[in-house]
Image: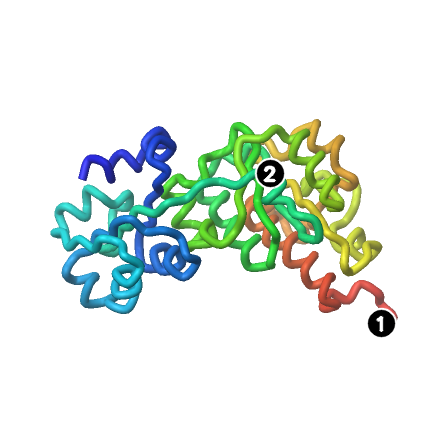
Amino acid sequence: MQAVIRLHTPQGRRESGLILAEGPAAVGEAVISGVAVDELFVTAAARHRFGEIIDRVGDSAATVIEVSEAVMSVLAETNSPQGMVATCRWTPVTLAEAMAAGTSSVILERASDPGNAGTIIRTADAVGAGGVVLTEGSVDPSNGKCVRASAGSIFHLPISIGVTISRAIEQARSAGQTVVAATGDGEEDLVEWLAGRPQDASLCWIFGSEAHGVSAEARDGAEARLRIPILGRAESLNVASAAAVCLYAAVWRQHGRLKTDPES
């Protein structure tokens, strides 16, 4: 049990090569994605409620261990666990793998909030992005809160970590991606800028931290700095919300669903 509790810490995850997936959503997505599950801890109630997921984990040769509610409360990281915690083998990929040619990608620059990072990973997965890069100084994406916020998308997407923003931008360009930074004071309107791009353009989106936004280096390295129009009295959008707007606007443009020509 102590080995599982150590996975609550970055050092424990690094040394073991394991991360925790908590709850049926994350565990189910890990299994569907072919991620190796070493052990699954379940309560009697969860075994009854989520039998199909547990059977699939068992079929993968993982060890299924039934534990009490008291033990589950120690193994889980949430205050109200859903009775299911799995140890999964997960490792980040290289920068080149996260930014493959012919795809679009997302750079999270010094993203410190695990909930926002996980939500953006989930959105990137939903729009079909090729990968996500977290620069140095960002939260560890294997953080339990980040894994839960991603709803299992961490197991779907190639994710690279710990690189400098300059290296990430250089790799995006090498992959043929146009680098754009989302910032509240951007010189160009998001939709107007997208209207002037080819529908099949591969884009690399940079989103900064909630507190500081994108850095001067990221601004200078981007081909465009885009703003989302604020029509009401809100000062700004949460970074995860802003990322969702940008990524879906781009994918709708790509598929011809964002009508940018008033005469079309």
The residue lying at 61 percent from left, 28 percent from top is 164
Q: Which residue is mark 1?
A: 264
Write down the quadrant of residue 239 in the picture: top right
Crowdedness near tag 1: few (<14), some (14–19) or many (≥20) residues, C-alpha within 10 Å? few
Which residue type carries mark 1? Answer: Ser
Crowdedness near tag 2: few (<14), some (14–19) or many (≥20) residues, C-alpha within 10 Å? many
Q: Which residue is mark 2?
A: 95
Residue 107, x across and y down, in percent: 61, 40
Report the coloring of the rendering. rainbow
Q: Residue furthest right?
A: 263
| Quadrant of the image containing the C terminus | bottom right
Write down the quadrant of residue 169 in the picture: top right
Marks 1/2: CA–CA distance? 39 Å
Q: Is residue 19 visible?
A: yes
Write down the quadrant of residue 140 in the picture: top left
Q: Nearer the viewer, residue 31 or 47?
A: 31
